[in-house]
Amino acid sequence: MNSAPPAVAIQTNGLTRVYGNLIALGGLTLTVHQGDLFGFIGSNGAGKTTTLRILATFLVPSAGSAVVFGHDVVRDADAVRHIIGYMPDFFGVYKDMEVTEYLDFFGACYRIPATQREKTVADVLELVGLTEKRGTLIGALSRGMQQRLGLARVLIHDPKLLLLDEPASGLDPRARIEMMAILQELQRMGKTIIISSHILSELQTLCNRVAIIEKGKLIYSGPVQGAQQQISDSAVFWVRIRGDHQGAAKCLAAHADIVGTEYVEDRLKVTLSSHEVDPSFIPELLIQGGFRLVEFYEDEVGLEKVFMHVTKGETQ
């Protein structure tokens, strides 16, 4: 029995935003499913922030529509605001406030009863790893801790959807890793997350689906693996054995699904005719042929390479 497809969290149709003669978004049609950790990729000026601001109800589209969990972002803007958490790439903090005061203030803005706010604040601080900083002045926090506090702020009302615009911007490697771990935990909790970022290597391991846009138009949307497969119809695997690499190449080259073998440094590059071909026959053939297999793995195409391949570097 086939499982039901995941429910839709966000659906845009022909989403367009025009500033004078500038088309910031040109007919963007995009689907994000519930539970996705969705990477939004594009150069500066591609339309990422414009899209997120429309979804967050801060901008009204010039044409087209966007629906968030069944609510139209224009007609039902108030309903949308109660189920989203939007974290812009640059956000202000009140540096002379303590961490708990800051979060309690935003909890009050969302009309969380005073009797519940203390526990809510404690819960979100624990989630983002700032419990020990609860009484610290915000101005004394590091950049990474302020980013985590910003994330805690958008979580205060327990939103279904998080819209995060460059949440790891300006962070050192440790702070970025910690931020990505928090986002993975939020996905496990059932949150739907859209994250725009220039750090494509991290999106590759973090996200289950991505969209690539350029000059306000959608170039690709789907699984990360599907984006990698857009570069080539064939699949590439690497094999390292002990002994006769030339003999191993001849052994493999006789198989109909193998379209190329090449010896590179200390291993064989094996190219299959299609991504649909089951590669398990490769080690089986080698072992049956008497070769000692040391290593076998698929060639990984990074999102950086995919992005450079499918985009032209054009900006608005």
Image: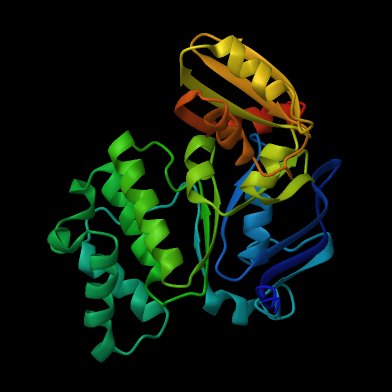
Q: Residue at x 78, y 61 (%)?
A: 61
Q: Say whether residue 53 is left or right of residue 177.
A: right
Q: Residue at x 50, y 53 (%)?
A: 88
Q: Quadrant of the C terminus?
A: top right
Residue in the foreground of this view, choosing between 205 and 173: 205
Q: Position of residue 183 (x, y in %)?
A: 41, 57
Among the 4 quarters of the image, the one containing residue 275: top right
Residue in the foreground of this view, choosing between 63 and 285: 285
Please say whether residue 300 is visible from this viewpoint.
Answer: no
Q: Say whether residue 259 is left or right of residue 295.
A: right
Q: Say whether residue 24 is left or right of residue 91.
A: right
Total tally of numbered discs in the picture: 0
Q: Position of residue 87 (x, y in %)?
A: 48, 57
Q: Position of residue 229 (x, y in %)?
A: 71, 39
Q: Does residue 248 lie above or below 272 as drawn?
A: above
Please say whether residue 125 is visible from this viewpoint.
Answer: yes
Q: Residue at x 22, y 61 (%)?
A: 97
Among the 4 quarters of the image, the one containing residue 152: bottom left
Q: Position of residue 306 (x, y in %)?
A: 67, 32
Residue in the foreground of this view, choosing between 34 and 144: 34
Q: Does residue 72 lie above or below 250 as drawn?
A: below
Q: Quadrant of the N terminus?
A: bottom right
Q: Residue at x 18, y 47 (%)?
A: 140
